[in-house]
């Protein structure tokens, strides 16, 4: 982890009590956990790279557009 020059959260006006800072930290940690779970739970559909031989035509012309794929 690298130390950045600018903090992630900055208090612009006023000051936080210990309870308010704890609540803010809990909310930010909960949002980060939910975002991480949502990213991990996204289903990935695999794309089949094979074809059934009986469904392919037996012959393609050497100049056929189907050979380009």
Image (tube, rainbow, N blue to C red):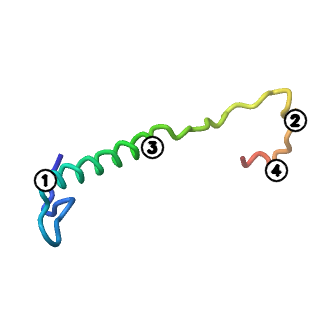
CB of mark 1 within 8 Å of CB of mark 4? no
Callout 4 environment at 10 Å: few (<14), some (14 to 19), or many (20+)?
A: few
- What residue is pinned by disc 3? 39
Give coordinates of residue 55: x percent, y percent. Answer: 85, 31
Q: Name the residue: 79% across, 28% down.
A: 52
Disc 2 versus disc 3: nearer the observer = 3
Whichever of callouts 1 and 3 sits on the residue coming sooner in the sequence is 1
Give coordinates of residue 5: x percent, y percent. Answer: 12, 62
Whichever of callouts 2 and 4 sits on the residue coming sooner in the sequence is 2
Disc 2 versus disc 4: nearer the observer = 2
Residue 40 sits in quarter: top left
Give coordinates of residue 41: x percent, y percent. Answer: 49, 37
Disc 1 versus disc 4: nearer the observer = 1
- What residue is pinned by disc 1? 3
- What residue is pinned by disc 2? 57
Q: Secondary structure at mark 4?
A: loop
**How far apart are the two marked residues, 2 and 4, measured between alpha carbons?**
15 Å
Give coordinates of residue 49: x percent, y percent. Answer: 66, 34
Locate residue 40 relative to residue 26 in the image: left or right. Answer: right
CB of mark 2 within 8 Å of CB of mark 4? no
Q: Name the residue: 23% across, 50% down.
A: 23
Q: Secondary structure at mark 2?
A: loop
Q: Where 6 sits versus 39, above or below?
A: below
- What residue is pinned by disc 4? 63
CB of mark 4 within 8 Å of CB of mark 3? no
CB of mark 1 within 8 Å of CB of mark 2? no
């Amino acid at each position: 982890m690298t130390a950045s020059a600018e903090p992630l959260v900055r208090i612009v006006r006023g000051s936080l009590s210990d309870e308010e800072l704890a609540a803010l930290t809990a909310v930010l940690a909960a949002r980060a956990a939910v975002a991480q779970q949502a990213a991990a739970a996204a289903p990935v559909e695999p794309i089949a790279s094979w074809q059934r031989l009986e469904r392919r035509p037996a012959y393609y012309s050497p100049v056929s557009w189907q050979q380009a794929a």
